[in-house]
Image (tube, helix red, strand yellow):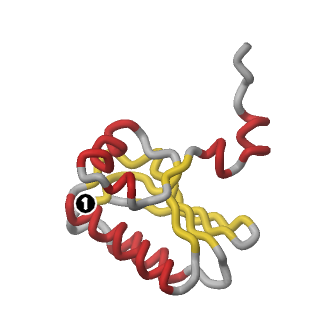
Amino acid sequence: MLKVHAKKLEAVEVLSLEGQIVSGDTETLRGAVRLVDGISDIVLDLSNVSAVDAHGLGVLLQLREQTLANGIHFELMNVNEPVSRVFKITRLDTVFQINSGIQFFPNTAHMRMPVAA
């Protein structure tokens, strides 16, 4: 079961996903994206996503197109290695903007992460 935790940071809606983005389990994500209002950016945090299938990729592409058509910036963040491989194999890593949390939230991430010497 896919869980979506929403957090609004000024004009940015961060949707933290937990579970699998797979066939039969994407309506929660679609609904969460439909509910956002008055924002300039949507960021999907995939750090707790364990799998994405072809249907899930299709839903992500649809959501990207819908948000971009409405003038909302859409990106993915914290894509873990197994899910990242799916994006690379399908070459969707060239379609989606994929960033780490450090790049998206530089001040917050810097305070949380120890600096390596």
Image quarter of the N terminus = bottom left
Q: In the rendered view, would you say 112 is above or below 90? A: above
The residue nearer to you, when weighing 46 against 102, is: 102
Residue 5 in sight in this render: no
Q: Describe residue 33's horizontal placement relative to residue 71 as left or right.
A: left
Q: Position of residue 23 (x, y in %)?
A: 21, 65
- Position of 12 relative to 106 (above/below): below
Q: Find residue 100 and report its horizontal and vertical position in percent.
A: 57, 44
Q: Residues within 10 Å of mark 1 (few under 14, many from 20)?
A: some
In this image, 86 relative to 8: left or right? left
Q: Which residue is mark 1?
A: 22
Residue ID at (49%, 79%): 67
Quadrant holding the C terminus: top right
Could you tell me residue 95's position as x and y percent? 39, 61
Q: Helix, strand, or loop for circle 1?
A: loop
Q: Residue at x 32, y 50 (%)?
A: 87
Give the amino acid type for the residue marked by disc 1 in the picture. Val
Residue at x 44%, y 46% (from the top left corner): 79
Specify the farthest residue to the front. Answer: 94
Residue 13 location, quadrant: bottom right
Q: Can I make out residue 48 in this image?
A: yes
Task: Give coordinates of residue 12: x percent, y percent.
Answer: 67, 68
Q: Residue at x 33, y 56 (%)?
A: 92
- In the image: residue 103, left or right of residue 28: right
